[in-house]
Image: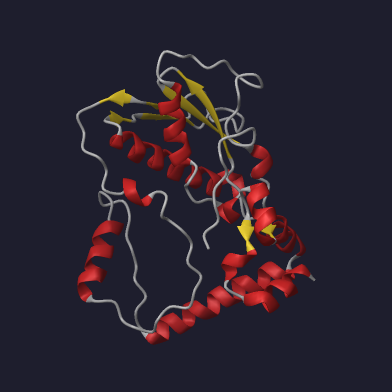
């Protein structure tokens, strides 16, 4: 079961009555639809630390600083990465509507309270991004994987997708010895998150227990997605 993202509302999109007036020179519903796709993006513990200001043919993105207080969120850098994912989703959605989405970063300076990005939507002769159908399908899968090697063709495709204009590199861990070592590091990190008070608090602040709470909050980590069964979920409640 994938965690459903928040709908547009007072916790995500700042309404005109509470924030800034919306300029109605472009179809507002179209811009809102781009934002709706944007907020499907991943974020640390699914806390979705974003705010949006709608303008004529554009959106300004702000960090929701109240959602950037986790111990791991050093200088809001993880939250800024999630903002980048929001922008990518909006650009992909805009391509499906025949629009480009040129983006200006930190248009008001680098103050934490200032806009981190200004995205303009412009009609353009561009093809629909092939990732558009998958925005709504993306989910975190915590199920056990089958111990089966991936075909070389799949590995090659993954490496190619991970190399973006020479600025990134994807490392695939395939040797059993390396996987065991990586598993030990991950296990140690999980243990530390339970042992250190600040990290433990941040984790449990993000947990959502049961369908009703998950649907009401529309953020955080639904424990049903941890694949730990009823007994494991009960232990988290202790």
- Residue 236: quarter of image: bottom right
Q: Position of residue 97 (x, y in %)?
A: 30, 32
Q: Position of residue 164 (x, y in %)?
A: 28, 51
Q: Can residue 206 be seen by looking at this rendering?
A: no
Q: Can residue 1 be seen by looking at this rendering?
A: yes
Q: Position of residue 50 (x, y in %)?
A: 56, 38
Q: Is residue 162 above or below residue 62?
A: below
Q: Is residue 222 above or below residue 81?
A: below
Which residue extends farthest bottom?
177
Which residue extends farthest front?
212
Which residue extends farthest right?
238
- Left or right: 79 as drawn, with respect to 132: right
State the count of labels.
0
Q: Position of residue 74 (x, y in %)?
A: 61, 49
Q: How is the image coloured?
A: secondary structure
Q: Is residue 236 above or below residue 220?
A: below
The residue depicted at 52 percent of the width and 17 percent of the height is 22
- Left or right: 212 as drawn, with respect to 118: right
The residue depicted at 69 percent of the width and 54 percent of the height is 213
Q: Is residue 16 above or below residue 184?
A: above
Tell me the quarter of the image containing the C terminus.
bottom right
- Residue 87: quarter of image: top left
- Residue 34: quarter of image: top left
Name the foreground residue: 167 vs 157.
Answer: 157
Name the foreground residue: 148 vs 198.
Answer: 148
The residue depicted at 29 percent of the width and 36 percent of the height is 95
């Amino acid at each position: 079961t994938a965690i459903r993202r928040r709908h547009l509302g007072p916790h995500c999109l700042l309404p005109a009555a509470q924030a800034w007036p919306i300029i109605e020179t472009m179809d507002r519903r179209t811009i809102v639809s781009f934002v709706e796709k944007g907020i499907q993006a991943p974020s640390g513990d699914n806390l979705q630390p974003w705010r949006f200001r709608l303008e004529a043919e554009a959106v300004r993105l702000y960090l929701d600083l109240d959602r950037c207080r986790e111990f791991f969120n050093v200088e809001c850098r993880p939250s800024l990465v999630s903002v980048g994912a929001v922008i990518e989703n909006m650009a992909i959605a805009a391509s499906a509507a025949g629009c480009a989405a040129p983006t200006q970063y930190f248009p008001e300076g680098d103050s934490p309270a200032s806009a981190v990005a200004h995205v303009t939507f412009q009609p353009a002769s561009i093809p629909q991004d092939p990732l558009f159908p998958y925005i709504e399908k993306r989910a975190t899968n915590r199920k056990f994987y089958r111990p089966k090697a991936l075909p070389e063709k799949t590995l090659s495709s993954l490496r190619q997708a991970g190399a973006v204009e020479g600025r990134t590199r994807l490392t695939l861990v395939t040797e059993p010895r390396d996987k065991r070592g990586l598993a030990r590091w991950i296990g140690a990190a999980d243990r530390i998150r339970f042992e250190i008070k600040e990290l433990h608090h941040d984790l449990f602040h993000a947990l959502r227990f049961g369908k009703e709470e998950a649907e009401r909050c529309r953020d955080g980590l639904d424990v049903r997605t941890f694949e730990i069964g009823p007994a494991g979920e009960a232990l988290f409640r202790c």
